[in-house]
């Protein structure tokens, strides 16, 4: 390797290692002036956010009748607090939500040999499975173990209530077909960690005879399905269920009476919105989102009342500081939305395309308030994908790092009065380090509404993981931590305010941080590519070398695309545009050094494997793909969130058959991401590389080209 390249690469890797593993212990910086970040830190109240969590979800709550004729309890609380905080532009926007299942009564009593209560929704609401039908039946209990097909048939279950330690839904589907009256499941959700928690479970609609329950072997065809019987599902925590299990395994005959009353209610999708206006309505908005409803039955303090309480606290912080003149009013508006996960927030986004067109980015909070040490959790930032490159990733990382590194006691500071340089702890919260992680993209929350191809607003997610009470009865307010809520609110408020107020000068600082972070990220990607070569065989080296180079080049492209996104903060500013070009050139320099290292490593790998080092020459298919640069048509966004999908579905099957994207030698790792990568600049070959850089499965180039042809037939892309 030439000496110059070695020196450059060494510098790159030293810088990358320094950024990721060691921070200068006397320097803690943010994009905001110190006076501004100090105001945000001082105003933030973890207790205010925790009190909201406790008010809404201190326990699993049965709903009242008037919630179905008026607003739901969660909506009432948030609106009342927004009004008390003086937030402007508060509105509740509703959309038809259809029918929702509601439990009125759910009791399970043992009647023989003794009379005692086994389960009741008044004790623990999740004891009755969502979707249970009304019933008043008496029957003998029968043990079916894990609920396999053989266990169900051997147990002779007709007219009885089955008990399982397997999946409630799976056992219900199979057992009720064979004439069981209902199912009792003993929760095995983390039984050794918390033996009294139960998952929020539901039972699927009755299947047609012969249907196979998901995850379970089909029952033998000779076992005829029985007529429909009253159907219900109860579940017990493992501590209580184990007693029942041992009695049944001892062949004790137990009779129970199940009384269930359930009904369907008409339930609207309720979204709550407010807006802190900026000085220039034309400058756009930043949107903070959190789903207030996991469902109407299923509830969770961390998932996601904590996210809702946290953006409520962000709204209070920023509105207070701006109204009192402690922070300058930003040029851009800061909007807040609470609603049902996906279904409600998606409806509002779809109905407000004009707002989406002027929205710069989305900050989504999901499960942000849990006590990190109790869950052995990290507070994670989930970045956008390569298809939605955006500076919001690095803006948010800046504040994660500020609190994460600032709330650590370092050995260098052990003799100073302030051993923790930036101590952020709620008075009643945990006095612990802030354990954080900057992650690649993950979906499954409302930021995906904004990231959707039909919307095009880059969105990140703030989330704590793991959560040991995730989707269980144990997810109540005592698992939340005021300190964690305070820190999350500070990060959200600082990130949103930074973008809302950013001008050309701030854009230069943001671009510099992106370029610095790019060095670290490309250093990591270089290691990934080097490991690909390290694991190559003599037979695979040529293909692995091509792949290693491709994914590194893809990462360089993403970093440059991210830099390009900064220009929206000061559109038309020639000085900023020139600066961004210089920063992109610097990233290219890091990329060139990395590619040189890959070439050198490939030569050593070939020598070790005893194969001839052949030049990497593009194939004919790659040459064709490199010339094909697709661009999205207006149809993609003409109807908003997810509406473009109908055009893909409408492509005739015969036409689609000409362009297979699955099957032998055909893989597209992520079609949604492929769509986002279509921007009029990336070639089809670039898109393939960028898919490979982000996914464990390698996409095949022909499948990528085929899917682009399908999108072209749908009228969604052109070239």
Image (spheres, rainbow, N blue to C red):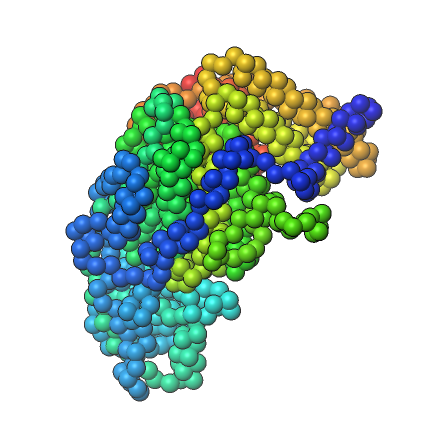
Farthest residue to the bottom: give it.
113
Q: Residue 389: x and y, percent?
A: 51, 29
Q: Residue at x 22, y 49 (%)?
A: 71
In this picture, is 378 found above or below 125?
above
Relative placement, left or right, of 664 versus 121 is: right
- Answer yes or no: is residue 216 visible: no
Q: Is residue 562 above or below residue 470?
A: above
| Residue 241 falls in image quadrant | bottom left
Point out residue 468 in the picture as x, y percentages from the top left corner. Answer: 48, 59
Tell me if 589 is positioned left or right of 38 in this view: right
**Residue 380 can be seen, yes or no:** yes
Location of residue 556 by image quarter: top right
Residue plotted at (47% across, 58% down) = 428
* Quadrant the C terminus occupies: top left
Q: Position of residue 223 (x, y in %)?
A: 33, 66
**Of the pair 700 and 411, the residue shown nearer to us:** 411
- Left or right of 52? Residue 76 is left
Q: Is residue 368 above or below residue 39?
A: below
Quadrant that contains the N terminus = top right
Look at the picture and state if 279 lies above or below 216.
above
Residue 450, image x, y percentages:
39, 34
Q: Nearer the viewer, residue 232 or 69?
A: 69
The residue that appears at 40% across and 59% down in the rendered structure is 477
Q: Nearer the viewer, residue 282 or 426?
A: 426
Residue at the top extreme, as displayed:
574
Give 118 or 705, whichever is nearer the viewer: 118
Residue at the (37%, 42%) spot, across then down: 316
Total marks placed: 0
């Amino acid at each position: 390797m030439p000496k110059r390249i070695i020196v450059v690469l060494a510098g790159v890797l030293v810088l990358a290692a320094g950024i990721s593993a060691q921070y200068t212990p006397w320097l803690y910086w943010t994009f905001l002036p110190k006076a501004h970040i100090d105001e945000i830190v001082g105003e933030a109240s973890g207790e205010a956010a925790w009190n909201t969590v406790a008010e809404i979800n201190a326990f699993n709550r049965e709903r009242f009748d008037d919630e179905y004729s008026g607003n739901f309890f969660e909506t009432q609380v948030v609106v009342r607090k927004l009004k008390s905080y003086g937030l402007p532009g508060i509105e509740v926007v509703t959309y038809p939500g259809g029918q929702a299942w509601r439990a009125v009564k759910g009791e399970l009593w043992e009647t023989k040999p003794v009379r005692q209560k086994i389960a009741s929704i008044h004790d623990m609401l999740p004891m009755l499975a969502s979707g249970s039908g009304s019933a008043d039946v008496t029957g003998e209990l029968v043990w079916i173990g894990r609920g396999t097909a053989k266990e169900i048939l051997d147990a002779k279950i007709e007219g009885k209530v089955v008990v399982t330690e397997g999946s409630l839904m799976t056992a219900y589907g199979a057992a009720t077909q064979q004439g069981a009256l209902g199912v009792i499941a003993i929760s095995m959700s983390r039984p050794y960690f918390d033996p009294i928690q139960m998952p929020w479970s539901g039972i699927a609609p009755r299947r047609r005879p012969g249907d196979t329950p998901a995850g379970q072997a089909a029952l033998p065809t000779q076992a005829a399905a029985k007529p429909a019987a009253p159907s219900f599902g109860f579940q017990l925590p493992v501590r209580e269920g184990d007693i029942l299990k041992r009695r049944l395994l001892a062949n004790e005959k137990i009779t129970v009476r199940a009384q269930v009353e359930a009904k369907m209610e008409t339930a609207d999708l309720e979204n709550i919105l407010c807006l802190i206006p900026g000085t220039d309505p034309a400058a756009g908005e930043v949107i903070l989102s959190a789903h207030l409803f996991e469902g109407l039955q299923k509830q969770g303090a961390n998932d996601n009342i904590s996210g809702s309480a946290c953006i409520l606290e962000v709204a209070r912080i920023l509105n207070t500081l701006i109204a009192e003149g402690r922070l300058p009013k930003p040029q851009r508006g800061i909007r807040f939305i609470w609603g049902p996960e996906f279904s409600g927030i998606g409806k509002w986004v779809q109905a407000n395309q004009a707002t989406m067109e002027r929205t710069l980015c989305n900050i989504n909070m999901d499960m942000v308030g849990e006590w990190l040490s109790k869950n052995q959790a990290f507070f994670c930032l989930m970045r956008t994908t390569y298809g939605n490159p955006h500076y919001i990733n690095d803006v948010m990382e800046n504040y994660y790092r500020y609190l994460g590194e600032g709330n650590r006691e370092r050995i260098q500071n052990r003799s100073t009065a302030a051993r923790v340089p930036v101590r952020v702890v709620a008075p009643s919260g945990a006095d612990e380090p802030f354990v954080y992680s900057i992650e690649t993209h993950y979906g499954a929350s409302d930021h995906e509404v904004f990231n959707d191809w039909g919307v095009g607003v880059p969105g990140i997610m703030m989330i704590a993981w793991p959560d040991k009470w995730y989707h269980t009865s144990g997810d109540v307010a005592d698992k939340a931590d005021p300190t964690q809520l305070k820190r999350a609110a500070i990060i959200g408020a600082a990130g949103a305010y930074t973008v809302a107020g950013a001008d050309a000068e701030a854009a230069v600082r943001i671009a510099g941080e992106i370029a610095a972070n790019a060095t670290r990220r490309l250093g990591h990607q270089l290691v990934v590519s080097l490991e690909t070569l390290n694991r190559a065989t003599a037979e695979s080296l040529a293909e692995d070398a091509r792949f290693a180079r491709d994914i590194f080049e893809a990462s360089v492209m993403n970093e440059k695309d991210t830099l390009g996104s900064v220009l929206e903060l000061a559109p038309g500013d020639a000085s900023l545009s020139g600066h961004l070009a210089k920063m992109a050139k610097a990233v290219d320099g890091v990329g060139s050094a990395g590619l040189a290292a890959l070439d050198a490593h490939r030569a050593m790998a070939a020598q070790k494997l005893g194969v001839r080092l052949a030049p990497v020459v593009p194939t004919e298919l790659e040459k064709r793909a490199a010339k094909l640069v697709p661009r999205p048509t207006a149809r993609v966004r003409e109807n908003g969130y997810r509406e473009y999908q109908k055009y893909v579905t409408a492509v005739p099957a015969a036409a689609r058959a000409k362009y297979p994207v699955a099957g032998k030698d055909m893989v597209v790792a992520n079609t949604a991401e492929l769509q986002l990568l279509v921007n009029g600049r990336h070639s089809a070959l670039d898109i393939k590389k960028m898919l490979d850089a982000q996914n464990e499965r390698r996409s095949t180039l022909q499948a990528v080209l085929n899917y682009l042809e399908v999108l072209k037939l749908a009228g969604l892309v052109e070239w």
